[in-house]
Image (cartoon, rainbow, N blue to C red):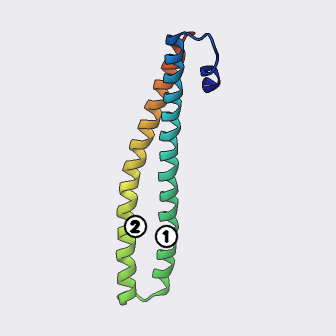
Amino acid sequence: MVVSLLGRPGLSDAATAGLRRLAALRQRVAARQAEVERLDGQTAGIERDEERIRANMQAVPTGNALHTRLIRQLDTAEQRMDALRTAISQANAAAEEAQKDLVAAVSGFTL
């Protein structure tokens, strides 16, 4: 809707600038939310990998070279999950901040 208003004749320079700012903030919110979704997708992929690794570990005798390798893979996956949890927390905070900025800008906007 904001973009469609930008093309209308008779808008003041201030109104046009305000609408451009709203459009930019809206894009920022969308980008932040997309980043959260991307990170969530990575988390889901790692969780699937961990399930597969755990199932494989049950099929291999303890102390076997393959079992040891699977333990290392699981450890690596857990380290990636820890990093992703931090990244998701930061991405969620950035998305919330972007949403607050957009709401504040919309609340204060006048034509």
The amino acid marked with disc number 2 is Ala
For the point 43% across and 30% down, the residue is 97
The answer for how far apart the CA atoms under marks 1 and 2 are is 8 Å
How far across and down, in percent of the image, does residue 39 sit? 47, 52
- Could you tell which of marks 1 and 2 lies nearer the N-terminus? 1
**Where is 56 relative to 107, above or below?**
below
Instruction: Check contact, mark 1 vs mark 2: CB within 8 A.
Output: yes
Count residues near mark 2 (Cα–Cα under 10 Å), then give few for <14, some for 14-19, many for 20+.
some
Q: From the viewer's perspective, is 47 left or right of 73? A: right
Q: Total marks drawn? A: 2
Q: From the viewer's perspective, is 78 left or right of 41? A: left
For the point 49% across and 70% down, the residue is 49
How far across and down, in percent of the image, does residue 30 sit? 53, 38
How far across and down, in percent of the image, does residue 1 sit? 65, 25
The amino acid marked with disc number 1 is Asp
For the point 47% across and 64% down, the residue is 46
Residue 4: assigned label: none
Quarter of the image containing the C terminus? top right
Count residues near mark 1 (Cα–Cα under 10 Å), then give few for <14, some for 14-19, many for 20+.
some
**Where is 9 relative to 39, above or below?**
above
For the point 48% across and 19% down, the residue is 104
Residue at image mark 2: 77
How far across and down, in percent of the image, does residue 15 sit? 54, 13
* Secondary element type, mark 2: helix
* Secondary element type, mark 1: helix
Residue at image mark 1: 49
**Where is 84 relative to 25, above or below?**
below
